Image: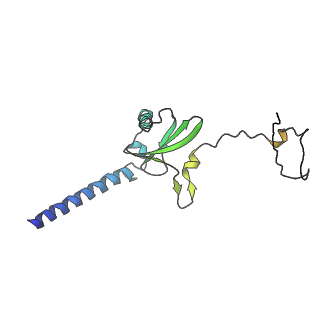
Amino acid sequence: MHEMKKIVLLISMISIVSLTMILTDRAYSTSGCDEDCAKCHKLNSSEASDILKSLKIPDAKIQNIQISPLKGLWEILLEKEGKKGIIYVDFSKKYVLGGPIIEIKTSTDKTAERLPPPPTNIIPQSKIPLKDAIVLGNKKATKKVIVFTDTD
């Protein structure tokens, strides 16, 4: 009788592992989606908003939703308080990942590639009036440091 329990337990474990492999294969296999995961898997703005609410960031605005470079994940581009970021949601919509996706072969940060460049508000040095400036060091130096002070 004890041997029978072992056999039933072994068959149950094999069944669970097999089922897990089949479900995982469907979620991550290129053949299951005909290499276009968006055909089988959907994440709309309403669902993404619900996910953000559950993460306690309901005021973040969704800029874009697309398949991530890593199979099995949605990429959501967000904007909050003028700052943009990316979070990843798995196809089951149960897990959220934050942080960069790095392609090992090229050491490329795929997340940074998808983020828009930060706005620049740099004033060209030539536009800064130096008429009343106190110059220290070589006046003909190729690189200059400009320090602003307010004596009042």
Q: Where does the C terminus fall, quadrant-wise?
A: top right
Of 69 and 119, which appears nearest the observer?
119
The residue drawn where x is 25% and y is 56% is 16
The residue drawn where x is 15% and y is 65% is 6
The residue drawn where x is 53% and y is 55% is 102
The residue drawn where x is 54% and y is 62% is 105
Up-down: is 5 above or below 33?
below
Image position, residue 151 (x, y; %): 83, 36
Residue 14 quadrant = bottom left
Of 31 and 95, which appears nearest the observer?
95
Q: Where does the N terminus fall, quadrant-wise?
A: bottom left
Give the side of residue 111 with respect to residue 36, left or right. right
Q: How many marks?
A: 0
Residue 8 quadrant = bottom left
Of 38 and 69, which appears nearest the observer?
69
Instruction: List the single residue furthest toward the bottom.
Output: 3
Up-down: is 108 above or below 152?
below
Give the side of residue 62 with respect to residue 27, left or right. right
Instruction: List the single residue furthest toward the front.
Output: 152
Image position, residue 10 (x, y; %): 19, 63
Give the side of residue 125 with respect to residue 98, left or right. right
Image position, residue 140 (x, y; %): 91, 51
Image position, residue 150 (x, y; %): 81, 36
How has the structure been colored for display? rainbow
Give the side of residue 22 with respect to residue 1, left or right. right
